[in-house]
Amino acid sequence: MRINEVEKLVGIPKKNIRFYEEQGLLHPGREPENGYRSYGAAEVETLRKIRLLRQLAVPIEEIRSLQLGRITLSDCMERHGVLLNREQRNLQQISQLCAELAGSQTTMDGLDTADWEARLRALEEGGVRFMSVRHDRRKKKTAPLIVAAVVVLLMGWLIALVLWANAAEPAPWWVLALVLAIFAGIIVGVLLALLERIREINRGEEDEAIQY
């Protein structure tokens, strides 16, 4: 089957299916004629299991550990239940604080941030965790930025090396142009891929994908 058929059969969007492939949770075959991804009954069943576990809010890492046999399903569910109970207590504390802030009838102009931040710190010291989406997305951008920088620097060094070698012993102009065009094309491709990756992160596509 092609990915469009799997999308309709399982009810998971294509971008989510590709996300699971990127995460190593799904391994479709390839059609020998054209290299297109080919999904069979095993991949469909894997996607259904992933969807079920994600609906239970099981993290991607845990699903990977299950697939690799590092943990059992029972151990995973018991540990996940403990984490969910902890998150529920966190949310109750945060909800209570939100209710208190709402009941204070404070305006935006009159909001005493020092007082409320002190209360937040007290909750954090008591074990409550607050998520910073902006910080999390910034961390996601770090790896692709580093990879892109390394590749661009490497290609730039190779271009400089080719130009230096050509100055010492000139090559035919078309050979030089071809080599430089290849290196320049790699740089452009990497930068375009980086731009698209950052757009995906900013749009929160992975955040949406982990719902399935």
Image: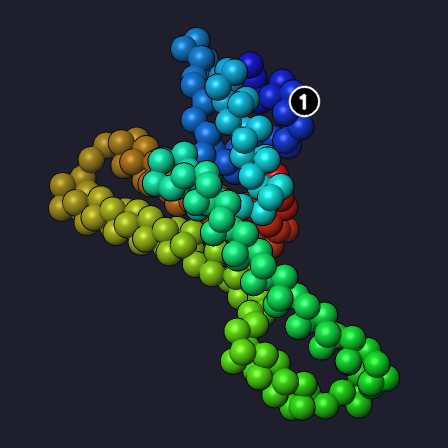
Query: In which quadrant is the N terminus drawn?
Result: top right
Does residue 133 appear anywhere in the picture?
no
Q: Residue furthest left?
A: 168
Per the image, the residue denoted by label 1 is: 8
The image position of residue 152, as x and y in percent, is 35, 51
Horizontally, is 45 left or right of 72 in the view? right
Q: Depth check: 157 or 38 in front?
A: 38
Against 81, residue 9 (above or below) is above
State the image coordinates of residue 91 (x, y, percent, origin top left): 66, 66
Work out whether 121 lies above or below 16.
below
Q: How is the image coloured?
A: rainbow
Q: Position of residue 41 (x, y in %)?
A: 52, 16
Q: Is residue 107 left or right of residue 211?
A: right
Percent of width and height locating residue 206: 57, 46
**Where 71 sits versus 144, above or below?**
above
Disc 1: CA contacts within 10 A as few (<14), some (14-19) or many (>=20): few
Residue positioned 55% across, 69% down in the render = 129
Left or right, 173 with reference to 112: left
- The one of 15 and 149 positioned closer to us in this rendering: 15
Residue drawn at the location 50% of the way across and 45% of the way down: 77
- Name the residue rendered at 41%, 10% in the picture: 32
> 50 above or below 114?
above
Image quarter of residue 11: top right
Q: Quadrant of the C terminus?
A: top right
